[in-house]
Image: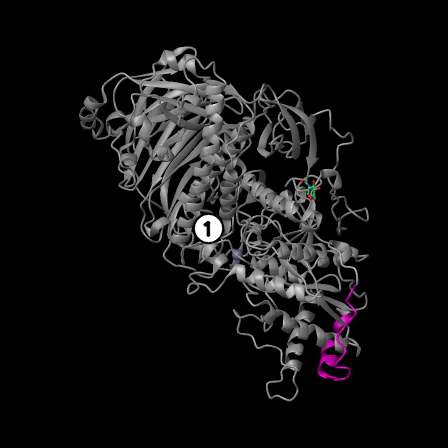
Amino acid sequence: MKVISSVILLAASFCCQEAAIVSQQHKRVERTCGYDGCPKPKSDMLNVHIVPHTHDDAGWRRTVDQYFYGTKMKLHKASVRTILDSVIKTLLSDPEKRFIYVESVYFFKWWNLQTDELKSQVKQLVNEGRLEFVGGSWTMNDGAVAHYQSIIDQFTLGLGKLNDTFGECGRPKIAWQIDPFSHSREFAFLVTQMGYDGFFIGRIDYEDKINRIKNRNLEMVWHTGANADIFTGVLYNLYHPPPGFCFDVLCDDDLIVDDINTPEYNLDKKLEAFFEFIEKQSSVMRTNNIILTMGRDFTYMNADYYFSNLDRLIKHIDKRQRNGLKVNAFYSTPSCYLKALHDQTGITWPTKNDDFVPTASTPHEYWTGYFSSRPTLKRFERVSNQYLQICKQLTVLTKNKVSNSQKNIDHLREAMGIIQHHDATSGAVRPYIVNDYARLLQIGIDKCSENIEESLNQLIIDNGNNSGISRHEGVGLDFKSCADLNISSCEISENSHRFMVTLYNPLGHSTHQYVRIPVRNGKFEVFDHKNGSMTYVLVPIPSDVRRLSNRENDTVFELVFFATDLPPLGYKSYFLERKSNLATVKSEVPAKIQDEFITTDANGPFTIGNQYLNLTFDVNGLLESAATEEVQMKVRQNFYFSYTFRPNGTQASQIVAKANVRLIRNKLVDEVHQTFNSWLSQVIRIYKAENYAELHWVVGPIDVDHEIITKFDTDIKSNGVFFTDSNGRQTMKRKLNHRDTWNLTLSEPTASNYYPIQSKIAIEDNTRRFAILTDRSQGGSSLKDGSIELMVHRRLSIDESPTFGKTSNDMAGNGRAARGTHYFVFGSKKIATKASTEANERFIQRQMFLSSWLFFSNMRHLSYDLWRKSYENTFSGMSISFPKNVNLLTCEPLGPNSILIRFEHIFEENEDKFYSRPVSFNLRNVFTTFDVTSIRETTLAANQWLEESKRLSFSTETSDANKINTEREIDAKPNDDDFEISLKPMEIRTFIVEFEWRT
Ligand SMILES: *[C@@H]1O[C@H](CO)[C@@H](O)[C@H](O)[C@H]1NC(C)=O
Ligand SMILES: [Zn+2]
């Protein structure tokens, strides 16, 4: 840059006049928050925005609480409480200083410990823009392995608390993802909808960064969706200070010594290094502003230490400025930096359409292993989310709440926020930290159970006709969840003679579900509330599941029945009765079930399926082909050792060539139980009424340094193209060995082609489409035409390598067994008269993500007749189902008469001929327990009224007009009393709804 060419020269000619004059030039009398309170850059100088900050991980080498309070310091020296104590004290002592704070989980832990007096002082700091919140979500979630529902929830939590506490001045304008290992387009889209003006990131692929530096493209406008552009800046130096300028107890850099009388004097040298650095940085930026992030992980435990050196730095730059130096350095914030860029005239910015996924930090270090690390934690996170949504909904639906109902939900909200943290979801932590995350989730689940039990009791008893039974006579029901259903274990169903199963459906649509309940052998009757006895079957639990070490029982069957017409935001209960004596059962079962498997040598190839989908298996017991009425494909599926993330990685190798199989067919389901070896098995299942197949895999315990993939090799001519979801929402088109933004150097043929899968990976040709949907975050790819692979388990021994995301021993260090499900969806690409295969995938994905939850209640001596008469055994929170392409994304309590509600269109433009159209519906009379009296729209995180949201826009190199439109189109007609809601493809709309209870 021109302005800086004289810098070095001037820096060398040190001059010492007017040492006593401390710069007054940035001092303003009136301080405000927001852009108006920003320091004004000087147009003829290089403006250096000095941004003091700290990066506080919500768990990494220590737990969240250890980091906050400062215990187990030996492992990692850090205390966030001390950081905030110290920073606030320093800010209060000098109005010139500014600081940003990012992680709301820590801020509010700290806030809750302060006196009212200090709180009001902190409010003043916020009101004056001296303390600025940036990011502001509960934690800094990872960009790749987080699901959009949980991202939105954890932003709503953090930003909501900030708005409640500080009002408008507490609303962050900048999204700040400086440490996460990938950046998805869906995440960037979400922050546009939350009203952020700019987005700063730290880590991108090293090749991408080299190119961006070369072309001065570190800062850009990212097109993230329709009317959803956001200014995005890649920080020049990650989130670190220039080398030599980390003035912290955690750093080793020399402090600035400006006392000329000591041999330790180093001011000139320090300044020279500083000028050299900023010159380098500014030479690759487009304006005469640069941002310097002054801080690192957990810095500022002694804030004065850092600040006093920054003071000295700024003071001496000021002095030289008065002698002609064209550098202007001042305390600033990311929003003030963004505003300075925005205010520059005549600057245009490059654009971006794809995403920053995946990331390599060197040719052989790809941050893609973490997509699959710690599979059991990644699944627990999904189940916890499901429970949170149900807890929020059931709390909304009933008038009488348990005391602390909001606090109960907060426990789980906060735990879900914490687990979104980039080291947590990624699994980049040690086993005992994983256990702490699991502990927090479990507490949240237990607390939420209080709300759920109260609501279900009210609905099932108090709404019933109360003939003979009332909860107030002390006969309240337990609604127990069986946490071990995933290993086919449940105390109540195994040991009770009579029990009730209540299916709660959290979707805004009525639905159906095949219910599987672990039981001992014998005869049963399954009743619903009106038609009496229902069809059921007993299906043997695969011996490989029964063998799992954490399974305590010897239950050998699952009872399966088909629950239909499960009402939206509602439940249906079933009564199950054992007809044979339990005592005789125990001894009668095992011998038969432990039979050797029926081998296919004897049976030859076979086919399972129904009218929608058939799967054929070969003589080795492996999947061979798939067929629908319209199309067929060859598809071979097996498990392999992968060497993707190992040095000198080679081709994946098949684990075994032949599976022992057991074939089960009955009225409700066809199943193939495959056993590959002592630690690897799978059930492939097609229910009679479903148009997809389920693959339930059990993998592990596995050895150290093993990575296991499942791979589907088909004859689909995919031409190197495959599709992956972005945070479970948008679809990204991927091309083998290709990046849209730069020419990829292929140093790691496998790892460089791995992408995060939150919900779906798909391939297609002109006539056929094949997708696998997942039940958790996994890494996946298509390394060969027609092939799809997903990593299901991994366990590496290297701990905390530079790209620790690549490593990790799974839970408890034993690589223990993981059980999971893949949904196999196959269909025609032709323009269909019915829903397209893509539409089918979206619907299955929604259904699997928020399936109906099973609650178990022991009925003891109650007869079916009395049960039927006494309880309200079905309930719907809604009088209609929403249109199929509308998803009820959020329904949660705000106050006694208000709720937060979100609707989304789940299709992309042109994804489906019919379902991709805009859709509208009316909210009047939708809910059955209350009447909506008003609705008011907010931005996505519900911390700002939509009509008050105005985002900054930036000119791009390619836009014709001077300024492109980044503002969301606001519906012309305010719909305050109309309640008509319309949605365009991929749109999410958020409302605060006021209501009155129906009597
Ligand atoms: C945010 O806080 C302000 C000030 O307390 C309040 O007036 C406003 O209603 C809040 N916004 C939302 C959307 O809740
Ligand atoms: Zn971090």
Q: Residue at x 70, y 33 (%)?
A: 936
Q: Is residue 26 magenta?
A: yes
> What main secondary structure does the magenta stretch of the protein show?
loop
Q: Split into 4 quadrants, where in the image is the N terminus? A: bottom right
Picture layout, residue 30 above or below residue 911: below
Residue 377 is left or right of residue 352, and the answer is left
Q: Is residue 831 magenta?
A: no
**What's the amino acid at mark 1?**
Tyr
**Segment colored magenta:** 3-28
Is ligand 2 closer than 8 angstroms to the Cβ of mark 1? no
Percent x, y for residue 131? 66, 58
Residue 392 is left or right of residue 5, and the answer is left
Percent x, y for residue 685? 38, 27
Q: Quadrant of residue 910?
A: top right
Q: Residue at x 39, y 33 (%)?
A: 695
> Ligand 1 appears in which quadrant?
top right
Q: Secondary structure at mark 1?
A: helix
Q: Split into 4 quadrants, where in the image is the C terminus? A: top right
Q: Which residue carries the number 1 mark?
A: 370
Percent x, y for residue 625? 40, 29
Residue 955 seen in the current view: yes
Q: Residue at x 42, y 61 (%)?
A: 72
Percent x, y for residue 784? 47, 43
Q: Nearer the viewer, residue 880 or 942?
A: 942
